[in-house]
Image (cartoon, rainbow, N blue to C red):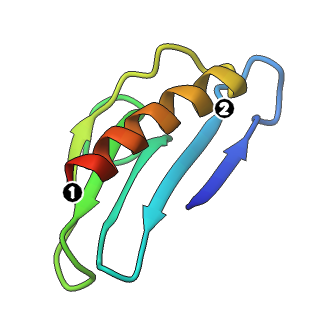
Amino acid sequence: MTVRWFAGETPAARPEFSFHYQDETGIDFGWHHEPNPHVEGWGHFQERQNSKTEYTYEPQTFSSTNPTRVVWEVLSLLAAKIQAK
């Protein structure tokens, strides 16, 4: 899993972050909070079946942008996603 977190240049700036998971079986998905032309708003989930296919995108609303809360929320989503695979 790769985690990126940028707090922003000012205290009022929105944080930009991503939690992206990829493994040797081809699983490739992640939760992102950053501008993206594929979805409206900042939050989205993206997934692809393998490295040769395009990502699909779904809007994602995070309950908070507090780092600790986001980590716990994403870990819960990650556990559910991996169990479903």
Location of the N terminus by quadrant is bottom right
Q: Mark 2 points at which residue?
A: 15
**Which residue is outermost to the front?**
83
| Separation of residues labelled 1 and 2 (CA atoms) | 30 Å
Please say if the residues under marks 1 and 2 sit with CB atoms less than 8 Å apart.
no
Label 2: how many Cα within 10 Å (few below 14, some 14–19, many 20+): some
Residue 8 placement (x, y as % from top left): 75, 35
Residue drawn at (22%, 66%), measured in percent from left and top?
48
Drawn side of residue 74 relative to residue 27, left or right: right
Residue 15 vertical placement versus 85 (above, below): above
Amino acid type indicated by mark 1: Lys
Residue 9 placement (x, y as % from top left): 81, 36
Q: Can residue 28 be seen in this view?
A: yes
In this orientation, which residue lies closer to the viewer: 50 or 77?
77
In this orientation, which residue lies closer to the viewer: 31 or 73?
73
Amino acid type indicated by mark 2: Pro
First of labels 1, 2 by sequence position: 2
Label 1: how many Cα within 10 Å (few below 14, some 14–19, many 20+): few
In this orientation, which residue lies closer to the viewer: 39 or 79?
79
The numbered dot on residue 74 is: none
The numbered dot on residue 85 is: 1
Residue 73 placement (x, y as % from top left): 50, 26
Residue drawn at (42%, 74%), measured in percent from left and top?
23
Helix, strand or loop at mark 2? loop
